[in-house]
Image: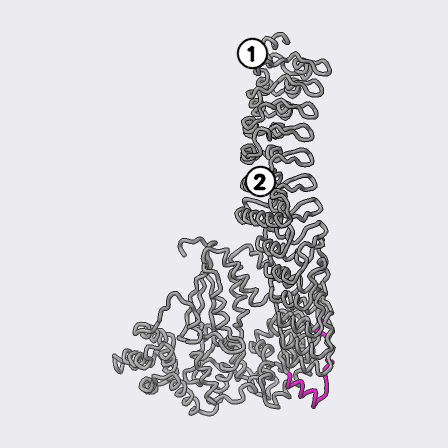
Amino acid sequence: MVKYSSKDFACLYVYFDYAEQRQQTYEKLLADLLCQLLRLRDHVTPEVEAVYDNLTANGIPPGPDEYLDMIKSEIKTFAQVFIVVDALDECLDEPPEHTAINFVRAMDQLPKRARILFTSRPMTTINDRIKADRKISVRTNINDLTAYFENRINNNESLKKLVEKGTQKNPRFFQNAVDTIIARSQGIFLLAQLHVASLASKRTLEDLELGIVELHTDLDAVYAKALGQIQHQAKWKRDLAIKVLNWLVYAERPLSLDELIHALGVNEADNELHRDRLLTEQDITLACAGIVLADPDRRTVSLTHHTAVEYLRNSGILQESQSYLATTCLVYICFDDFSAALHNLEERDDRLKQYPFLRYAVDYWGNHVARGVRDAVSQLAWNFLTNTKKLESAFQVMSGFPFRQESDVTGLHIAAYFGLTALVQEGFRNRGQLFAINAATRSGETALHWAARYRQTRFLQLLVDEDADLNLTDNIRSRNQSALHRAVANRDADSVKVLLESRRCELHRPDAHNWTPLRWAAAQGHGSLVKLLLSHGARVDDADTDGWTALRWAVRRDHMHVAKILISAGADVESPLGGDQDGRTFLQWVASEGRDPLVRLLVKRGVDVDAADERGWTALRWAVEYGRGTAARLLLQGGASLSKTDIHGFAPLHAAVQRWSPAGGGGAQLSLLRMLFEQQQQQQQQQHRSRTAGVNARTRNGFTPLHIAALHGYTPVVWLLLEKRADPTKQDSTGCTPLHCAAAGDHVDVSELLLASQRGGTRLARVVDNEMRTALHAAASGGSQAMVRVLLDGGALPIIDVRDYEGYTPLHLAVKKQYLDVVSCLVKGRANVNMVDDRGRTVLHSAMDDGNMGIIKALLAAENVDPTIKDAKGLTAWDVAKRRGLDMKVLERKVNDKETPTCMKAAQ
């Protein structure tokens, strides 16, 4: 890491915790890794920006695949990324989630610059899937255990006193204890940890000594011993331990010490909290025989190790756990102190501070009820759901942004959130339908919306059976979605199937963005949902407000498998795309996007490859325009014509030359050009046309590909075109040759190639355009001394004094634009300085008019310069100088720097 700056590398961390298995989902793990990466940058990659834009514009949340793609794109912006994954063995690896397997697979797909360190206990099913470069086995040693034991003693006053008492009795007491723990732990730190935790619960030296002697070498035996101690305690103490273990084993998330203390202080008949019943952390740990740890400073409480969870679940000691937990939550929620609604955040925060268990109780009571409870608990839950005041008060402190922003929530909404199907079903059957089944919250969401949003399929089925309106939409800004929209957006195939099989859903109802459920499914790449919607009658070609169909969204999001499903279902691939300003067909669009599998599929299905859009562009032209070489080859193999031109007369070859750029993958573009030439020759042979017809094809302005390449200075392309027998003498509609174009653009290398070509040479330099200008005129007008020299050396010397339609020679243009270097070069090349334009003016007239002493001096140094020549107004160059107010003395001094010609003296 030392060799990288902080901007070059990233360190990411993933900590698995057995107690949070249900919260640490595969999707959340990927989202957390992405967040860690994004915090290290002040900008994001286009992939992340695209997903964010889609989320804000359409409310489409990213799925696991999109999270993984974004992580990959962000990692590529770093030189090295280090990822530490701790306690992989504590990650959930059960169906249907298979979080651990999916996570390991995802890590294996990351770019090579990501280096990953896993820590895990030996686990055959997961560890075998890790493609490790190196594995290190870590085991405890005597020094580790000694240090751990000393630390535990020093942090536990009662144990410290017992050890000191034992040491007074026997100086080797401490060392003997450590030796015994090490021997009974068999090198397994977990056993050592449990042994020390068990000994820490002892209260007399005699109990401590006996505990050391009875230490087991088997993990299950350690737990069995602890449970045996619990069973043999006084009843109140045993009952307390059972309650504690219930919470630590079956709570939906880890409880804090304060939350657990409040939960233990609740009795079924309570209507208020009795604070005199609240226990201490010592009461809790003493009752649990060393298998529970409490930290009074950090206010945490937990089992000594997560392996105790499975043991306790299978031990039979914990009975009707969900009923006990649900009852405690409901009794706590319904305290009289919570009857009044909260008015502001300050009141809410104060209530949560005074009653720390309240947040857990309102967040998770329904989870415990949903897992099956006694009838009495079900009645308690039903009473709560039908008590509007209690419900409103509880809802105000629920976790999560959606809840804090919502109001008018009914008991049916809450039941849908938790999936309390059996409870509501029983309530409807025995107590009547006490809820308005289509009642909506402030956001316009019914209980059906909530069942779809929170993936409660069985509850959703119940609402469908109870004749809920399936087509109501919410009024959330920028959404306006039905329950079917919500289920599709959630990728919940089971809920979608329930809604569709009811035959009451409006499949084509659009949301605020005019998106139907089919477009949602296609955009998210869910082929199974797309098939399901199509099988129930979804219209495959419905478009949104921008004219985009499900097929276009599938392609844009790179979901090729979905696109193939839609095409097989009859999606229109021939008509112009809706909302496309160019009037492109689907084939033209996918060709421009480089979606090669779809190009191949459409060509194979016989789609018209030469269909043109409003600009006359075919699919081949679009492929060439965007440098899609593979797509272009597929189209040509499918019979696409290379002679088809657009409204400006541009053929694909013209376009390929025009878009060539050395900065944009010049080599690949040259390969594309070569491929076009090869295909063109084959087509010309088949059509019995000249082999050079294509390479010299003209646009409406008369441009050949060589004109375009010369104009832009694309030397490699010019070389290739000349190799393919392009004619450099061809003239465009203005009479310009490629040499004119190269000279105007100051492309010296290109000009040299053209002049040296077999069809070029000296005659090319003498060609005039429609304004009677040669390439030398263009070079002189552009001010390029190097270009002027190349042209003079390449054959332009004999026509150095050719006049254009205004009578200007190249020298006139250079003087007019005050290019001293060019003027000097032309003068040395023996350009005639006495040539007059259509107004009878020589170059010296123009120089005097401009007052450029450098140019004047260069011209006066020329042989045979005649300043006495009069223009159409009868003025000599000297007259012009006087009229322009030039300092005659300075001029004379400049002139006299060299020997003044006789004609100049006469003029003076």
Mark 2–mark 1 Cα distance, whole angstroms, equals 55 Å
**Relative to 623, is 300 on the left or the right?**
left
From the viewer's side, name the closer residue of 726 and 347.
726
Q: Amino acid at mark 1?
A: Asn
Q: In the rendering, which numbered label is found on residue 725?
A: 2
- The reply to whether the C-beta atoms of the residues labelled 2 and 1 are less than 8 Å apart is no
The local secondary structure at tag 2 comes to: loop
Q: Quadrant of residue 521?
A: bottom right
Q: Residue at x 51, y 73 (%)?
A: 99
Part of the protein shown in magenta:
421-445
Q: Amino acid at mark 2?
A: Arg
Q: Residue 660 in the image: state x and y as whole percent.
A: 58, 45
Point out the image quarter for the C terminus.
top right
Q: Residue 845 in the image: state x and y as whole percent.
A: 66, 18
In the rendered view, how is the structure colored? Answer: one colour
Residue holding disc 1: 896
Q: Residue at x 63, y 60 (%)?
A: 603
The local secondary structure at tag 1 comes to: helix
Identify whether 692 is placed above or below 632.
above
Decide whether residue 669 is among the magenta residues. no
Q: Residue 895 in the image: state x and y as whole percent.
A: 57, 13
